[in-house]
């Protein structure tokens, strides 16, 4: 018995809308998407301001003794960071000296833009963040995004005041990588991650003499090949490798730090080619 029209009306309406969308010119679609992206930017800004206000009032609930103790802990952390900054300056000066002696081409320089995270889209469909900096701060699509824990992802969409960051756990992200302590390049790609599960990725073209398991994982780092990400940044831990069917290479599973999806602030590396290599001065030593 044929169905009545009112029963199939939602499906007919959906079909008409789909056909109409396919017939719309590409320029109109692009303009509509960009307009919607800019229209939602104030909502992201408002949500971020609400979170900041919540954090402010939660801090006001702490006692003076708790704030004093937190200040002491922060002073210790600042002291350790000061020492690390001096060590880093010394190492950078040594790298610059070796590059000069060996006549190596200078590495790409970056300008650091710190951005607050306004929204998280974490599901089986999306693995991305919306951050509160965009075209007005010189950010462009493709800029790498990092944190103190390593690679976060890359910028895929840029508006005037906000940007979309595709997380390292997304299958759309591929990187050339190294195993820590090894200089043979391998290929990393984000995986299909469930909504409430732990994020992971895959690594391919792994040499047969490399072993890794859950008890003895190996750290996967950026190789610096291609100039997209600086070398040495953490991607994740390889917790499993197994030979491919061809017997020439191995493939493995990469466990991504869950803190990547919980960040409240990230750093965007904006290429600064016009500035050239920044001068680095070694810290002064006592006579």
Image: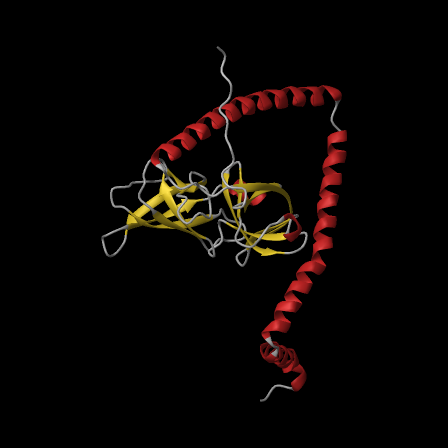
Horizontal and vertical percent for residue 148?
53, 36
Which residue is nearer to you in this view: 221 or 113?
113
Q: Quadrant of residue 68?
A: top right
Foreground of the two, 241 or 188: 188
Residue 61 in which image quadrant: top right
Tag count? 0
The image shows residue 128, relative to residue 95, as above or below, that is: below
Residue 4's quadrant in the figure?
A: bottom right
For the point 61% across and 86% down, the residue is 3
Residue 39 drawn above or below residue 198: below
Q: In the image, is 203 to the left or to the right of 37?
A: left
In depth, the one of 248 and 182 nearer the eye is 182
**Vertical arrangement, residue 61 with respect to residue 242, above or below:** above
Q: Is residue 149 visible?
A: yes
Q: Residue furthest top?
A: 287
Examine the rendered structure and indicate whether residue 225 appears above or below residue 78: below
Which part of the image, by quadrant, shows the N terminus? bottom right
Colouring rule applied to residues:
secondary structure
Residue 40 lies, in percent from the top left, at 70, 58
Q: Residue 125, image x and y in percent? A: 54, 59
Residue 263 appears in the picture as rendered = no
* Lateral position of residue 212 relative to residue 237, left or right: left
User: Residue reaching furthest bottom?
Assistant: 1
Residue 28: x and y, percent? 64, 73
Front-most of residues 210 and 266: 266
């Amino acid at each position: 018995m044929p169905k009545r029209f009112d029963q199939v009306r939602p499906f007919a309406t959906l079909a008409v809308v789909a056909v109409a969308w396919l017939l719309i010119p590409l320029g109109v679609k692009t303009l509509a998407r960009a307009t919607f992206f800019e229209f939602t930017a104030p909502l992201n800004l408002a949500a971020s301001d609400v979170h900041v206000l919540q954090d402010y009032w939660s801090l006001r609930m702490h006692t003076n003794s708790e704030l004093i103790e937190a200040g002491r802990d922060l002073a210790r952390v600042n002291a350790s960071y000061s020492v690390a900054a001096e060590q880093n300056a010394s190492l950078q000066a040594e790298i610059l000296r070796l590059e000069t002696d060996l006549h190596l081409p200078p590495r790409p320089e970056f300008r650091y833009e710190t951005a607050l995270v306004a929204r998280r889209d974490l599901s089986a469909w999306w693995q991305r963040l919306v951050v509160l900096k965009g075209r007005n701060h010189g950010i462009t699509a493709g800029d790498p995004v990092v944190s103190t824990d390593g690679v976060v992802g890359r910028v895929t969409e840029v508006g005037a005041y906000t940007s979309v960051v595709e997380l390292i756990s997304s299958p759309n992200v591929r990187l050339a990588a190294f195993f820590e302590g090894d200089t043979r390049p391998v290929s990393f790609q984000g995986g299909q991650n469930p909504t409430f599960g732990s994020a992971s990725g895959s690594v391919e073209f792994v040499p047969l003499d490399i072993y890794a398991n859950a008890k003895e994982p190996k750290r996967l780092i950026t190789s610096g090949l291609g100039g997209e990400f600086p070398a040495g940044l953490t991607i994740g831990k390889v917790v499993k490798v197994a030979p491919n069917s061809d017997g020439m290479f191995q493939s493995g599973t990469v466990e991504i730090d869950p803190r990547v999806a919980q960040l409240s602030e990230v750093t965007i590396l904006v290429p600064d080619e016009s500035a050239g290599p920044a001068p680095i001065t070694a810290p002064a030593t006592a006579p």
